[in-house]
Amino acid sequence: MLKRMRAELLVPVVFLLSACGGEQSQQSAANPCAANPCTGDGTGIDASLVTMPAGAALNTGGKSQAQLVAMGEELWNDKSLSSAGATACSTCHVNKYAMINATFSDPYPHYVKMAKDRAGLDQVSAAEMVQLCMAIPMQAEPLAWDGVDLTALAAYVESLQGGFDASMAANPCAANPCNPCAANPCNPCAANPCNPCATTP
């Protein structure tokens, strides 16, 4: 009787493990953040690519702040900005605030770990942060410094600060479907640089 019960219990366990492995494989293939170089090998980039040139000024193109923010929101969701046409800002910054550090609550310019680690910059403006993301996660050319697109994206990024609470950065797992650790036991958190749950409390 005991042997029979053990055998009956073993079947669903084996099935669950098998299904879990299959789901993990499917998620890995579909995960747009799996190759995100934000937390890659630490290779540095030329800081001049993402640092606003001396004397340069952002170009509003005659648009109001509200118009710039609206335009920036469209660009935030535009995958064509990435080199492969498969990644937008919103791809990894899901629900706007996933994968954003606590320093985001500080007024720009401020310290950003990726800017320091990858470009040696102690602080960046919103526009410079946009350029850093263009060069690293998006793997594309930085936007034109005098272009309205850069101004619009920077305006949108700054507009997001009003709804950000530093506590959101404590555990990005809950808001980031790239690696929903809390709800998905099939996804090995430690192996996914998109959302390194193992290092979060």
Image (tube, rainbow, N blue to C red):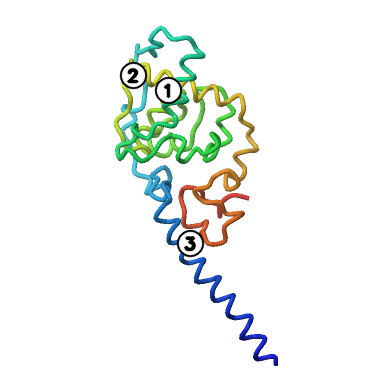
Per the image, label 3 sits on a secondary structure element best described as helix
Vertical comparison of 67 with 175: above or below: above
Query: Separation of disc 1 and disc 3 at Cα?
Result: 39 Å
Tell me the tag on residue 145: 2
Tag 3: Cα neighbours inside 10 Å, few (<14), some, or many (≥20)?
A: some
Residue 176 rendering spot, x and y as whole percentages: 54, 45
The residue positioned 53% from the left and 37% from the top of the image is 100
Please tell me how crowded label 2 is: few (under 14), some (14-19), or many (20+) other residues with Cα within 10 Å.
many
Which type of secondary structure does the marked residue at label 1 adopt? helix
- The amino acid sitting under disc 3 is Glu
Is 158 drawn above or below residue 165 in the view shown?
Answer: above
- Nearer the observer, disc 3 or disc 2? 3
> Which of pointers 1 and 3 lies earlier in the amino acid sequence?
3
| Closer to us: 72 or 201 | 72
* Residue with the mark numbered 3: 23
Q: Quadrant of the N terminus?
A: bottom right
Residue contact between numbered discs 3 and 2, judged by CB atoms under 8 Å: no
- Depicted 97 relative to depicted 62: above or below: below
Type of the residue with mark 2: Trp
Separation (CA) of disc 2 from disc 1: 9 Å
Residue extending farthest to the right is: 1
